[in-house]
Amino acid sequence: MSEPAAVPPKDAASDRAPTPDDIGGAVEALLLMADEPMPVDDLAEAVGAPSAVVEECLRQLAGFYESSGRGFELRQVAGGWRYYTRPEHGDLIARWVVSGRSSRLSQAALETLAVIAYLQPISRSRVSAVRGVNVDGVVRTLLARDLIAEVGHDEETGAVHLGTTTYFLERLGVARLDDLPPIAPLLPDAEQLEQELSALAAALPEAGRPGDSEPSAPTGDNGSEHGRSDDHDDLEE
């Protein structure tokens, strides 16, 4: 009977359980991406460490932020952990937000607001199609200014519908949407827009046939030129 093959010795370092110092950076990265409190067990699963080690890591991070006077803190709330700005900076942040709300809207934001006002309820993707650019940035600005709000969902696609708010009417000095200037006929309605985009998509293969002087420009999901976006308008002019 032959002897069993020798088993190579295990690397002691590879079997060592991770310490709070080992996972500190990974835990911070996960928490920075979180938009709601993250439970310890979820963090432990993500970084591949025992929950007790993750718990200790979180408490060490929270203590470090406190002792080093950072402008943010790590709190344990609602069954998880999340970053928050410190309460002592609340007045500063409030003043900054208010000053931002009082600044003028950019041209891109005004155009996007007009599309929403006259075609509401309308999804963000259709607003992008009307304007020909990505409008995620300006939509965030308009939502933050309380000029628009989410007003429901499309029954077929589940897409969020956007509409104007009473604050929008107040700022324009009108009582209802019917009092807006009659420029809606200048904008294509959703059905007409879909027909135009479908016709354009059907014509693209022919336009790109061999022999054309230039290939057609790459497009994004909304039919706009690749990379063109109004995201920079999230910061007002």
Image (cartoon, rainbow, N blue to C red):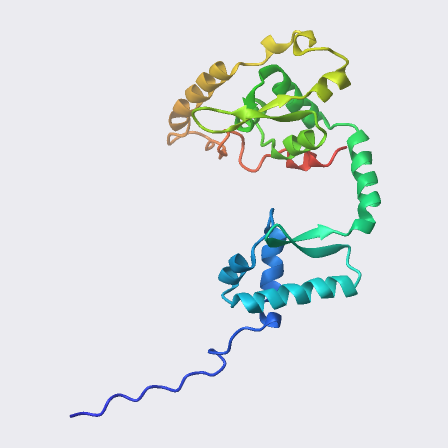
Q: Nearer the viewer, residue 67 or 28?
A: 67
Q: Is residue 129 visible?
A: no
Rendered residue at 83%/44% (across/down): 92
Total marks shown come to: 0
Residue 225 horizontal/vertical position (percent): 54, 32
Residue 72 horizontal/vertical position (percent): 74, 54
Rendered residue at 36%/86% (across/down): 8
Asked which quadrant contains residue 156, the reply is top left
Image quarter of the C terminus: top right
Left-right relation of 101 to 39: right
Q: Nearer the viewer, residue 136 or 81?
A: 81
Left-right relation of 84 to 81: right
Left-right relation of 30 to 70: left
Residue 65, compared with residue 88, is above or below; it is below
Task: Please identify the residue farthest to the left as the structure is shown.
Answer: 1
Asked which quadrant contains residue 179, the reply is top right
